[in-house]
């Protein structure tokens, strides 16, 4: 895994964090609420089986290794982001814009 280069400001923040200079401004009640929400969000209570090409699986495994996580966790994260709307298919959106009324198609 490559070591990221930090700006001076980021290094200062990291140094302060490591020295315990930061304190949470959240109340204990709010922390508990957020922990409960996170636990519910990441609860894995369903199993799926999918068939992938060897090439795609190897690519997922390679990317997961770069990120330092199991490939199943990476796949789950990608699917969650897509379903929640924070990840979308750029190529599909480009073709929709190109085919939209009033626009010329190539």
Image: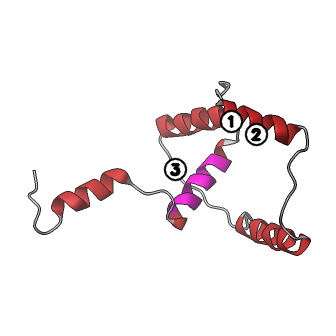
* Discs 3/1, front: 1
Q: Which residue is mark 2?
A: 13
User: Alpha-carbon distance for marks 3 and 2?
Assistant: 44 Å
Which scheme is used to colour this image of the protein? secondary structure
Does the magenta-highlighted stretch encompass residue 76?
A: yes
Above or below residue 39? Residue 71 is above
| Residue name at image x 54 percent, y 66 percent | 84
Q: Which residue is mark 1?
A: 9
Q: Which residues are magenta?
A: 73-82
Label 2 CA crowd tier, 10 Å (few <14, some 14–19, many 20+): some
In depth, the one of 65 and 96 nearer the eye is 96
Mark 1 falls on what kind of element? helix
> Is residue 24 shown left or right of residue 60?
right
Q: Which residue is mark 3?
A: 51
Q: Quadrant of residue 18?
A: top right
Residue 77 place in picture, x, y as percent = 61, 54
Does the magenta-highlighted stretch encompass residue 7?
A: no
* Discs 3/2, front: 2
User: Alpha-carbon distance for marks 2 and 1?
Assistant: 6 Å
Mark 3 falls on what kind of element? loop
> Is residue 66 shown left or right of residue 102?
right
Numbered badge on residue 57: none
């Amino acid at each position: 895994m490559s070591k990221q280069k930090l700006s001076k400001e980021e290094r200062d923040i990291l140094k302060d964090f490591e020295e315990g200079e930061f304190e949470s401004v959240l109340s204990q009640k709010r922390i508990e609420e957020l922990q409960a929400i996170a636990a519910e969000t990441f609860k894995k209570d369903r199993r799926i089986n999918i068939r992938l090409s060897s090439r795609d699986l190897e690519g997922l495994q390679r990317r997961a290794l770069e990120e330092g996580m199991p490939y199943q966790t990476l796949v789950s994260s990608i699917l969650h982001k897509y379903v929640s709307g924070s990840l979308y298919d750029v190529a599909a959106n480009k073709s929709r814009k190109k085919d939209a009324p009033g626009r010329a198609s190539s």
